Image (cartoon, rainbow, N blue to C red):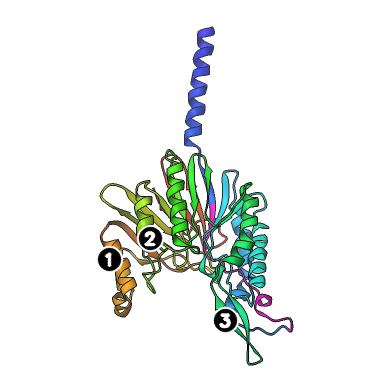
Amino acid sequence: MFIRIKQIFTLLVIFAAFILCAAEYNAIVLGDIHFDALSYHCTPDGKPQVRINQGYIDMWKKQAPAMLSYADKLITPETAFVIQAGDFTQGDAISPEQQAKMLADAFIKVKSFFPKHRLLPVKGNHDVRYYLPHVNDGKTIYQRCDSGVPAAKAFLPLVAKELGRECVSGNYYVTYDNDLYIFYDSMIKNSTSLKFLRDTLKKKPNVRHVFFITHLPVLPCSTGTPGWRVPGADKIAKMLFERNAIIITAHTHNPSLIKVSNGKNTLTQLVVSSIAYQWNRGKSTSLRAADFAGFLKLISPQKLQEKKNATAIKDLQALKINLFEMYSNATGITVLKVNNNKISVEIHTDTSGKPALVKQLK
């Protein structure tokens, strides 16, 4: 009898271990959301003083809240957190104070849709751009500034609260279920962020999966400007190759998926898009380019000849391109699904509850 109970107990332990190993979790991923309102661009008399994007202002009155409400419905008991891949805001506020307020308001607004889950952002180029007023010949002139000070002032305390620990820069990491999520700030001094990445990978040598989240792509994927890449992209790629990492990025507003190898390891880059212009209007993520050759055909000859773009494409061609797909710019909520054996994403473009696109990342 004792032997039989012991055998049953052993089987239960094995079964529990199997369930644990097979456990799956997910994360909601938001790309560029460009939070905006007219008030951030106006003087006290209500007159706008700088360039505004009325489309984004209108978007945040209806489509963006509707999209985030749907994203909240995709939350399950297995959801770990919510990732935002930069351009949280439209930026272009009329002062650093208004820029900081825009960022803080955006965070609070988006967080209200996911009150029980951590909201983990990285800074985008729009998050650090605002205007400084200068008086010239008695007239106030607004000059654009791309300092990250207001963004740091607004973001860091909020991110620290989400992390439950001090956050001294836009670079930070999170571990979950033995997976490493690196949030990389491409809007500050390049050497500082590269050191952070190097130190973090060294500190975490035995994690299962490595995810690298940044706003600017590492691998070229924009038909308008292929050279739009994170500063130090070649050095970043070299470090990430060593860990067979998955890059999650945004910026281009066009979803894409790239898988490359360097002869030894592989690197996967997913560009997500969540601009809410077309939310729930039935526009799907159709295939724009089925391979790298198709991608090149979408770029104008003039753009291909520009030095920055030519260098980016040459760097990519030096690798073995296993997959290169670009999709149409359909508003989407991305759900990242992770377990021991595979990593996949679902992109939802309407409220049907069914993903428009499902892709295996690993």
Cβ–Cβ below 8 Å for labels 3 and 2? no
- Which numbered disc flags the more N-terminal residue, 1 or 2? 2
Is 141 part of what is drawn in magenta? no
Secondary structure character of the magenta stretch overall: loop
Instruction: Give the farthest residue toward the bottom.
Output: 137
The quarter of the picture where residue 289 lies is: bottom left
Cβ–Cβ below 8 Å for labels 1 and 2? no
The disc placed on residue 314 is 1
Q: Is residue 129 above or below residue 42?
A: above
- Mark 1 to mark 2 CA distance (whole Å): 13 Å
- Mark 3 to mark 1 CA distance (whole Å): 36 Å
Q: Residue at x 69, y 85 (%)?
A: 47
The disc placed on residue 143 is 3
In the image: residue 243, left or right of residue 348 = left
Q: Residue at x 45, y 50 (%)?
A: 211
Dot 2 corresponds to which residue?
233
In the image: residue 150, left or right of residue 291 = right
- Which numbered disc flags the more N-terminal residue, 3 or 2? 3
- Which numbered disc flags the more N-terminal residue, 3 or 1? 3
Q: How far across and down, in percent of the image, does residue 297 sit?
A: 30, 73
Relative depth, front residue between 339 and 140 = 140
Report crowding for label 1: few under 14, some 14 to 19, many 20 or more residues within 10 A (C-alpha): few
Q: How far across and down, in percent of the image, does residue 323 sit?
A: 32, 57
Amino acid type of the residue tagged 1 in the rendering: Lys
Report crowding for label 2: few under 14, some 14 to 19, many 20 or more residues within 10 A (C-alpha): some
Cβ–Cβ below 8 Å for labels 3 and 1? no
Report crowding for label 3: few under 14, some 14 to 19, many 20 or more residues within 10 A (C-alpha): few
Q: Magenta part of the protein: which range?
A: 28-45
Relative depth, front residue between 335 and 94 = 94
Q: Is residue 61 visible?
A: no
